[in-house]
Amino acid sequence: MKVLVTGFEPFGGEKINPSWAAVRRLPDEVEGVEVIKFQLPVTFNGVRETLPRMIVKEHPDAVVLTGQAGGRPNITVERVAINVMDSTMPDNEGYKPEDEPVFEGALTAYFATLPIKVIVRALRKAKIPASISNTAGTYVCNAAMFTALHTIAVSGMDAKAGFIHVPFSHEQALDKPRPSMALETIEKALEISIRTLIDDLNRERI
Ligand code: PCA
């Protein structure tokens, strides 16, 4: 089995993005499952071009996308991606879409196909604050989640996909009064999420 895990490059004037900073430190193999790590650009066009190519090429059993949700105090596992790009903050290419679809003619929304509640329970059992989020926003993270779920749906693949948002790291919060989490904890949270997902896939396939 193979799991594709992505994080994002920095954006919004930050020097790091804790999602990629944590993903790049993950092991290359978890419970005998290959972990492919990939850094995504924070651009609406970049994710819509890169992700479908990666998913079709790697043909993973699951896709775990991660991104920074600055201001959120805990790990949030997203429930839904919507077919909208709407942003007042430009992406890293200066693009600021208003009320545009991620993919013209596609469904209004896709639910995550990861076992989101099982993941949240596993994180909380490990004493890591985590909850379900019912919105991934309308910026690049939502577009990436929508793109992954749409790609899997239209190509008829049997892969699970979803998105995990992580807070600012302590290092990022040094100069601003915002909630933050240790990068080590974020990394541990992602590893637990991947383990939980693999256990779930194994159970389903017995
Ligand atoms: N967070 C942004 C995009 C990239 C990232 O890490 C978001 O939540 O949309």
Image: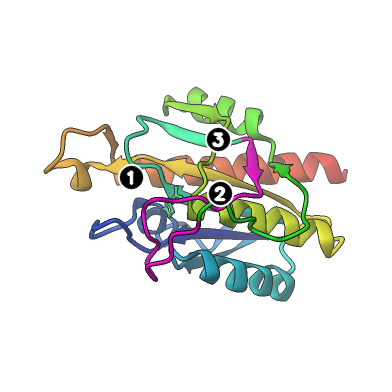
Q: Is residue 202 left or right of residue 9?
A: right
Front-lying residue, 136 or 37: 136
How far separated are the C-alphas under marks 3 and 1? 25 Å
As measured in the structure, the alpha-carbon distance from the residue carrying label 1 to the one carrying label 2 is 25 Å
Dot 2 and dot 3 residues touching (CB under 8 Å): yes
Q: Label 2: few (<14), some or many (≥20) within 10 Å?
A: many
Residue type pointed to by label 1: Glu
Q: Which residues are magenta?
A: 79-97
Residue 135, label in figure:
3
Work out whether mark 1 precedes mark 2 in sequence or the reverse, and give the earlier one. 2
User: Residue 114 at what x, y percent from top left?
Assistant: 69, 42
Label annotation for residue 184: 1
Counting residues from the start of the chain, the first of labels 3 and 1 encountered is 3
User: Where, quadrant-wise, is the N terminus in this rendering?
Assistant: bottom right
Classed neighbour count for the residue bearing mark 1: other residues with Cα under 10 Å, few (<14), some (14–19), many (≥20): few
Judge: label 2 CB < 8 Å from ligand 1.
Answer: yes
User: Image quadrant of residue 188?
Assistant: top left
**Residue 32 appearing in the image:** no
Residue 93: x and y in percent read 39, 71
